[in-house]
Image: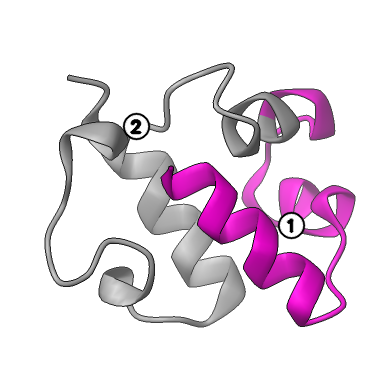
Amino acid sequence: MIGKLIKQYLKDNGLSQRFIAKKIGMTPKTLNAMLNDKRGISVEEYFKICGALGVDANTFCNGRISHDIAGD
């Protein structure tokens, strides 16, 4: 769920997954797996993504760190 929200944000803002992956030191393949809910997103990865996008951490999780992000 979080991955899909981030993916939509990238699309809406004309940002490529490759650009964000490079910015956070991740392979595009790994980022793509996270954004397509094929792989969980760790809290650390989530904060890196938010930082790279320049958005508040609450942007994609409605004010809470959800179990989706933590992989629980």
Q: Which residue is mark 1?
A: 20
Q: Which mark is residue 42?
A: 2
The magenta region covers 1-30
Q: What distance separates the C-alpha of mark 1 from that of mark 2?
A: 16 Å
Prevailing secondary structure class for the magenta stretch in the rendered image = helix
Indicate the position of residue 29 as horizontal and vertical percent values: 80, 24
At x 46%, y 55%, the residue is 48
Indicate the position of residue 38 as horizontal and vertical percent values: 59, 17
Indicate the position of residue 14 as horizontal and vertical percent values: 87, 78
Q: Amino acid at mark 1?
A: Ile
Res 7 → quadrant = bottom right
The answer to whether marks 1 and 2 mark residues whose Cβ atoms lie closer than 8 Å is no
Asked if residue 52 lies in the magenta stretch, the reply is no
Q: Is residue 59 left or right of residue 58?
A: right
Q: Is residue 48 left or right of residue 66?
A: right
Binning the other alpha carbons within 10 Å of mark 2 as few (below 14), some (14 to 19) or many (20 upward) gives some
At x 53%, y 44%, the residue is 3
The answer to which of marks 1 and 2 sits earlier in the sequence is 1
At x 28%, y 41%, the residue is 43
Indicate the position of residue 11 as horizontal and vertical percent values: 80, 68
- SS class of the residue under badge 1? helix
Q: Which mark is residue 63?
A: none
Q: Amino acid at mark 2?
A: Ser
